[in-house]
């Protein structure tokens, strides 16, 4: 029998327990940096070395992190469902855990990109992109990251996936950044929808979602047991 399609939108919260800091929690990454200086085309134009260093540090830190039980539970669910991950994260923990279908909305930390031909994207074996590292067309390599103010090339395929979902889950995202946050509007009305996040402020109603106010490693297990029992 054809497996039901489970589509999961993940954010920084799913990697928090692996040691990768989120962005907007207290002590989050953006507290230490001016977003526009290190994650925008203007910042890149102003000071490429600062931007390269920012992402080199994040890459070095992420390279030593391992998937946690939440990433692993999503792999386990592939036995029961056709699982598609749409992630805002640029780490590679979903792939490291073994997820087979991962769509990165905001790019990938361990890849570099040509500055004059965005279609030229390269796997990285080390953790540094240095000034003077150039693409095959001779231009400086940049991080393969979607910066604030840039288009999100993968948003269309992501929206199509959400429209096709038989079950939808949101794990570890503040839903503060569009167009990613808008994906929730593409779900069919009558399907099961889950929201896993330990800090669910009452201001965020999302009445139509089954809220699991737990950290990802616990909440994903709770959801997994429920959807296997009810829908597999
Ligand atoms: N388990 C689950 N959720 C958690 C955990 C945890 N252990 N710890 C924190 N969270 C939740 C927080 O409550 C918050 O809702 O994860 C969410 C993290 O939100 P953000 O820091 O805003 O991260 P995210 O939603 O992924 O940001 C979206 O914004 O900065 C840009 O491009 C960047 O992809 C990022 C986008």
Image (tube, grey):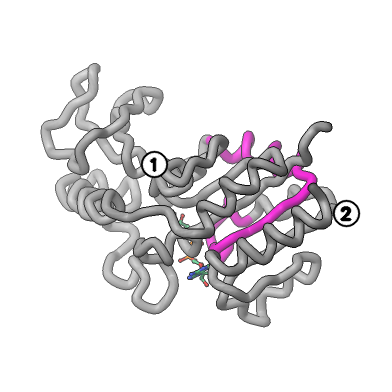
Place residue 95 in its image quadrant.
top left
**193 over 24 or under it: above or below:** above
Which of 207 and 64 lies nearest the eye of the viewer?
Answer: 64
Residue 132 sits inside the magenta stretch: no
Q: For residue 40, which numbered disc appears in the image?
A: none
Q: Residue at x 59, y 40 (%)?
A: 155
**119 over 166 or under it: above or below:** above
Confirm if mark 2 falls within 8 A of ligand 1.
Answer: no
Q: How many marks?
A: 2
Tell me the magenta residue range. 154-181
In this rendering, does residue 179 appear at all? no
In this rendering, does residue 36 appear at all? yes
Q: For residue 190, which numbered disc appears in the image?
A: 2
Residue 1 % position (x, y)? 83, 32
Relative placement, left or right, of 202 versus 128 is right
Place residue 207 in its image quadrant.
bottom right
Q: Which residue is mark 1?
A: 108
Residue 46 % position (x, y)? 21, 49
């Amino acid at each position: 029998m054809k497996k039901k399609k489970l589509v999961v939108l993940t954010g920084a919260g799913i990697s928090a327990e692996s040691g990768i800091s989120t962005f907007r929690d207290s002590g989050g990454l953006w507290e230490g940096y001016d977003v526009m200086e290190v994650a925008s085309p203007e910042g890149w134009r102003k000071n490429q070395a600062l931007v390269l260093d920012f992402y080199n540090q994040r890459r070095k830190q992420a390279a030593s992190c391992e998937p946690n039980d939440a990433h692993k539970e999503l792999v386990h669910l592939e036995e029961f469902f056709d699982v598609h991950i749409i992630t805002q994260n640029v780490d590679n923990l979903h792939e490291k855990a073994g997820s087979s279908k991962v769509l990165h909305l905001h790019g990938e930390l361990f890849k570099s990109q040509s500055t004059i031909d965005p279609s030229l994207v390269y796997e990285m074996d080390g953790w540094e992109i240095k000034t003077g590292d150039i693409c095959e067309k001779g231009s400086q390599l940049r991080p393969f990251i979607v910066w604030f103010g840039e288009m999100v090339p993968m948003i269309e395929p992501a929206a199509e996936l959400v429209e096709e979902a038989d079950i939808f889950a949101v794990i570890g995202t503040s839903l503060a950044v569009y167009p990613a946050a808008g994906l929730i509007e593409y779900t069919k009305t009558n399907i099961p929808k889950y929201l896993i996040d330990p800090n669910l402020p009452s201001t965020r109603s999302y009445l139509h979602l089954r809220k699991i106010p737990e950290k990802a490693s616990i909440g994903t297990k709770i959801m997994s047991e429920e959807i296997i029992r009810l829908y597999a």
